[in-house]
Amino acid sequence: MNPLSKRFIKSRMGMQCLSRVILTGVVLLAVILSVVGCSSNSEPSNSEPIRATWVAVQADGDTLSISVSEVNNNKLVHFLLGRGPSGDIAFMAYELDGKIYVRSNVCPPCWSVGFSLQKDILVCDTCATTFKAKTGDGIKGACVAFPKASVPYEIRGDTIIMKRNDLITAYQNTLEPEWPQG
């Protein structure tokens, strides 16, 4: 066999070997991407923020109420209390570790009306200031000095019952930096 023929055979075998390596690599990459893609879409992450759902409040004189099941089903709801010509004030109710919390839903000085719940942290939808969901205390951000005041309530059946004056007091307390908690 002449030297040129030997070189041709060797280069052809080298190309076949290289082709197999490339093909194996492509197949392996496709399998990895498939597994990663399927596993990341199979269930929502616990760290994903829960966005609020707006619900209607029921008013009966000085008593206001929202549904426990709406809070449990949505995990975080927002609702408005009408206060006359100057506008409405917003509140939130959320379920965390089997307990319901009701708080003022304003973030001064950015004047956001809206929070998301990420695990046990409330996150302002405008300025991203964070607050402890169980206490309303600020953690980090521009509006950290304005804790989210809690609203006293009672539960009767599937109804969370609140007093108008308690809602207004919680709203006013949230407008005050570092209001006394306790």
Image: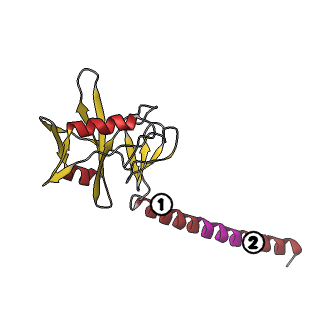
Q: Which residue is mark 2?
A: 14
Q: Nearer the viewer, residue 171 or 35?
A: 171
Give the percent coordinates (x, y) of residue 159: 15, 49
Query: Who's the residue at 61% across and 70% down the image?
Result: 24
Query: Who's the residue at 57% across and 69% down the image?
Result: 28
Residue 37's disc number: 1
In this rendering, would 147 be left or right of 71? Answer: right
For mark 1, give the secondary structure: helix
Give the percent coordinates (x, y) of residue 32: 54, 66
Q: Nearer the viewer, residue 48 or 92?
A: 92
Q: Label 1: few (<14), some or many (≥20) within 10 Å? A: few
Write the start and end of the magenta stretch as one range.
16-26
Number of marks in the rendered image: 2
Q: Main secondary structure of the magenta part?
A: helix
Residue type of the residue flagged with mark 2: Gly
Was residue 24 drawn as part of the magenta stretch in this picture?
A: yes
For mark 2, give the secondary structure: helix
Q: Quadrant of residue 104?
A: top left
In this rendering, would 87 be left or right of 181? Answer: left
Give the percent coordinates (x, y) of residue 167: 26, 38
Was residue 11 drawn as part of the magenta stretch in this picture?
A: no
Q: Quadrant of residue 86?
A: top left
Give the percent coordinates (x, y) of residue 145: 48, 40
